[in-house]
Image (cartoon, rainbow, N blue to C red):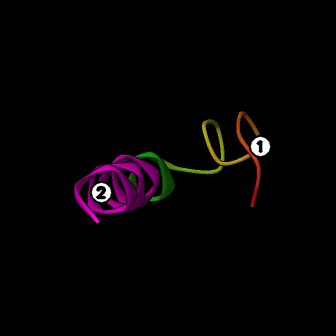
Amino acid sequence: MNIQGSNFMVKGIAFTKGSKGVRIGPA
């Protein structure tokens, strides 16, 4: 569950950054 947590955090940060990095990875 460590890897999943890291991925979630990275996605959360990208989401907060803006729609610029939201379309870079899968939903």
- Residue lying at the far left in this picture: please name it: 2
Position of residue 14 measured from the top left corner of the image (x, y, whole percent): 45, 46
Check disc 1 and report its element: helix, strand or loop.
Answer: loop
The region drawn magenta spans: 1-13
- What residue is at 36 percent from the left and 46 percent from the top? 10
Q: Is residue 22 left or right of residue 11?
A: right
Q: How many marks?
A: 2
The Cα–Cα distance between marks 2 and 1, rounded to whole angstroms, is: 16 Å
Q: Is residue 6 magenta?
A: yes
Camera-side residue of 14 and 27? 27
In the picture of the structure, the residue carrying the numbered disc 2 is 9
The residue pinned by badge 1 equals 23
Q: Quadrant of the C terminus?
A: bottom right
Q: Is residue 22 left or right of residue 5?
A: right
Q: Nearer the viewer, residue 26 or 15?
A: 26
Disc 1: CA contacts within 10 A as few (<14), some (14-19) or many (>=20): few
Nearer the observer: mark 2 or 1; the answer is: 2
